[in-house]
Amino acid sequence: MSLIDRTRAVLDQAIGVYRGTPYAGRLTGVRDRLDAPLRVAVAGRVKAGKSTLLNALVGERLAPTDAGECTRIVTWYQDGHTYQVQATPKGEAPRPLRFTREDGAIDIDLGGLTSAEVERLVVTWPARGLRTATLIDTPGIGSLSDQNAQHTWDLLVPDDEETPADAVVYLLRHLHAGDVEFLRAFHDTEVSRPSPVNAIGVLSRADEIGVGRLDSMASARRIAARLGADANVRRLVQSVVPVAGLLAETAVTLTEIEVAQLRRIADLPVKQAEELLLSADRFVNTRPELGLTNLEREALLGRFGLFGVRLTSTLLRREVATTATDLSRELAERSGLTQLREIIGSLFLERRDVLKSRSALLALAETTRACDRPGGEAVAAAVEEIMASAHPFNELRVLSSLRAGWITGKPDVVAELERLIGGSGSAASDRLRLPPDAGAAELTDAAAQALTRWQRRAENPMTTYEMAVAARVAVRSCEGLLAGMGRPR
Ligand SMILES: Nc1nc2c(ncn2[C@@H]2O[C@H](COP(=O)(O)OP(=O)(O)OP(=O)(O)O)[C@@H](O)[C@H]2O)c(=O)[nH]1
Ligand SMILES: [Mg+2]
């Protein structure tokens, strides 16, 4: 039986046991969630660029990005057939809210409520980017003690409710000491909570790191790589990727008019264009003959940032991309959005069932602790049994231990182990460190060799205890790969 089916079965059993108690409804909700899209929260400090990045992932400008009452409320963006906004005031039933949208973010009328009175907003919006994952925008965290930190905390580390988020994208802004402190506080609550298993880091506003120079992304990539290798960061998030969120958002919502405006800059001689783009102020106030009003120039800066204007006009001049469609793809790539999407795909979406089961089993374990019922012990035992025996969970545990530095060994052995148990994606080629287009024979060969290698390591008396446990998990992973390739073990 698959992990998700085992989870569903124990949930059904629990729903029977807790029928007639206040927990029954919650458990039904947990079961329904198993089939719903993955819930991914976007979290980070104030003004880290969370809402902007969320829009880039959705492919539309939905979330408001400036100051405003709604930026202080946890807001869910989910796919649906109709356009709808609902507020859940604290301790009350959800109610519909009026909203408007004119080319830009949704403007929600809170109907007399203040942000402090609203527990959450749910925006239902038909959008392709929301089909595989519901995205949750969170208010920026100023300090660990502030009210917003509490909201984000509740979302990710609930005490008596189900865990509403299955995974989290954490925005770091050029390593702020407080970021690591915050991530660590999450981590310390319990191993099962946000951990490298379901968290990835984004070095946000990456264009600003190189103060908008054309090579800003290269600097950002270096810093992200350094961060991603830092032991403190590694135990908190799976990997760190740089993203210029503003440019990413603009890339996916680019208009022909904007392309035509930037072409005017691209058509200038290189030297003149460089001078014009020396600073934002210069860009807005010099060269009146350019054919762009000050307002238009300010609008371009607001949409692209200085880095984006420099980069896009250069791409146009060099004819790297000439149409809005090509340009949009190119900017998505260069802003880091494409890579982030791939990572979300391989680390979250491909692992959907494991992350979903994990959230559901955690909620179930919470219920069995909170409410004593005849049959409750059997449910608790069944949950424990799945948590302890299901291979995907064993892989996640080894991954966490590796990231926490509890399993040590030669760097290449540790790196191989991490890949093999799915640390960089669960596809066979990812696990076996082969190109994505590797043939069946090559994959089978590599898996068989890895199996022998890790069996030996597991049985070798010189292997440390922790490594031996991990090696046995790796052996199971290899067996699983071979079974998936239809080869008898
Ligand atoms: N240059 C640049 N500016 C950005 C980037 N991302 C966001 N911004 C700007 O930073 C400001 C804040 O962006 P938001 O997306 O609202 O940030 P947030 O983290 O949601 O902010 P709060 O919800 O208020 O905490 C806006 O003016 C954005 O235009 C980026 O990648 N580069
Ligand atoms: Mg925001």
Image (tube, rainbow, N blue to C red):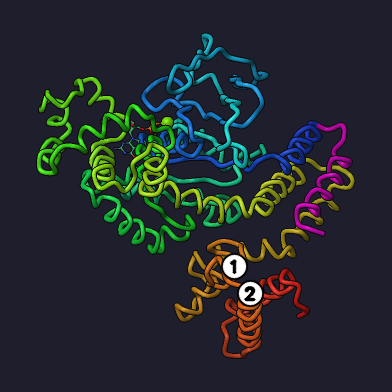
Residue 271 visible:
yes
Q: Label 2 is placed on what type of residue?
A: Ala
Residue at horizontal 61%, vertical 20%? 84
Q: Is residue 55 toward the left or the right of residue 393 in the image?
A: left
Residue extending furthest toward the bottom: 461
Residue extending furthest toward the top: 112
Circles 2 and 1, Cβ within 8 Å, touching? The answer is yes
| Front-lying residue, 224 or 74 | 224
Residue at horizontal 87%, vertical 31%? 20
Indicate which disc, 2 or 1, sits on the residue closer to the N terminus.
1
Q: Is residue 378 toward the left or the right of residue 218 in the image?
A: right
Which residue position is annotated with label 2?
A: 474
Q: What separation in Å lies between label 2 and label 1 (alpha carbons)?
A: 9 Å
Is disc 2 surrounded by few (<14), some (14 to 19) or many (20+) residues within 10 Å?
many
Q: In this rendering, is residue 69 above or below 337? A: above
Q: In this rendering, is residue 288 above or below 181? A: above
Residue 143 visible:
no
Q: Is residue 262 magenta?
A: no
Q: Which residues are magenta?
A: 1-21
The x, y position of residue 70, in whole percent, is 46, 22
Q: Quadrant of ligand 1?
A: top left
Q: Is residue 3 magenta?
A: yes
**Quarter of the figure that contains the N terminus:** bottom right
Residue 252 figure quarter: top left
Which residue position is annotated with label 1?
A: 398
Secondary structure, magenta segment, majority class: helix
The x, y position of residue 54, in whole percent, is 47, 36
For marks 2 and 1, give the one nearer the viewer. Answer: 2
Residue at horizontal 45%, vertical 37%? 56
